[in-house]
Image: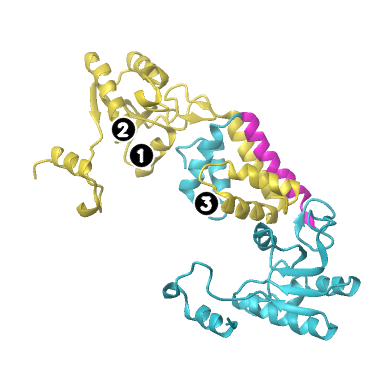
Chain colours: A cyan, B yellow
Amino acid sequence: MEYYSKEISNLIAELSDLPSIGSKSAQRLAFHILGMDEEKVNDLANAIVQARKNVRYCKECFTLTDDELCPICSNPKRNKNIIMVVEDTRDLAAYEKTGKFDGVYHVLHGAISPMAGIGPGDIKLKELMVRLQQNDVEEVIVATNSSLEGETTAAYISKLIKPTGIKVSRIASGVPVGGNLEYIDEVTLLRALDGRTEL
Amino acid sequence: MEYYSKEISNLIAELSDLPSIGSKSAQRLAFHILGMDEEKVNDLANAIVQARKNVRYCKECFTLTDDELCPICSNPKRNKNIIMVVEDTRDLAAYEKTGKFDGVYHVLHGAISPMAGIGPGDIKLKELMVRLQQNDVEEVIVATNSSLEGETTAAYISKLIKPTGIKVSRIASGVPVGGNLEYIDEVTLLRALDGRTEL
């Protein structure tokens, strides 16, 4: 990019390194940033540096946060007896958006994947078991993704928890609401059939 | 976003303010940044701040750069007698990528648009005329966009320059290479017809 000056090229290169930002998007973003108020640009850069600097795991549920306890674990209105297990912080956010779950979470930071060499020891499973021992938990809802890795992890968690007598459940898998059967893959259709409920 | 902690929410909000980054993309980017090496994050923030802080117009062609002269105007191999007029720095980059133009540029930073209240005085037209007076220029190639504003600007520039005796040309408008006539709009088809050349 010798037609852009050094610092502009550098900015474009840094932006291109971000996921799903190609070279065209990086150029558009870069020129947008160059046209922003300097104060706004400093706010953006500060937000990036500060968030990264202070990010850590919530000591209770292991979601990414910048305090000792995340906003959910520190909320006295949340029901600490029901724990939803998710793969990452964004999955937690997806359920929070529904506004209908008032329990707490446990973030695994990954899923068991023998193919990728990720075993049970590489995700926050031990930490989940410690939580179950130290707290009075009624139910663990496994909300890992509906992928091979997510299912493997769900089965593993179920085996691990069953002996403790705590109830373990799995979120339903099936046809998404508004989904047209015609466009849905066979595996999902079979799941939906297996998971049918009486009317 | 009360399910994300303060600094993470702030980072997502700052990223969402960028063009073409919706709330989902902003979340994906934010969590990617939170997972990057702290050093890489500082590099990114620095690139943003430095580029914005030092950005200015090339004193010759008015492209965005961080030196007094841009890499093109300061290159002794470029032919200073041919000036290609473009709307913005990214248009300049588009022609540079072809590697086939060895003249220099003039960046208008916009186009005349009566609808948007942008007149000839709001873009770098006066600066172009000064350049033409002070330098020995053979040809001005008008490469503004093929939009209403771009065409209006091209016509205006042509009128302005004609009296000086300097040659003014306009890049061709027509069917893009690889373009299928079936999918091309009528205006472009008529342009291509008007601009036909003998075989």
- Inspect the magenta stretch and tell me whether residue A48 lies in it: yes
B4 within the magenta span:
no
B5 relative to A187, above or below = above
- Looking at the picture, tell me which residue is in the foreground, A11 or A89: A89
Label 2 secondary element: loop
Tell me the quarter of the image containing the C terminus of chain A: bottom right
Helix, strand or loop status at disc 3: loop
Query: Is there a contact, CB below 8 Å, between mark 3 and mark 2?
Result: no
What is the x, y in percent for residue A150? 64, 75
Tell me what residue is drawn at x 76 percent, y 62 percent.
A102
**Distance of label 2 from label 1 (alpha carbons):** 9 Å
Q: CA distance from mark 3 to mark 2?
A: 27 Å
Disc 1 residue crowd, few under 14, some 14–19, many 20+, Cα 10 Å: some
Query: Where are the magenta residues, as a range?
Result: A38-57
Which label was assigned to residue A21?
Answer: 3
Type of amino acid under label 3: Ile
Q: Amino acid at mark 2?
A: Ala
Alpha carbon distance from label 1 to label 3: 22 Å
**Position of residue A129 measured from the top left corner of the image (x, y, whole percent):** 83, 75
Q: Nearer the viewer, mark 1 or mark 3?
A: 3
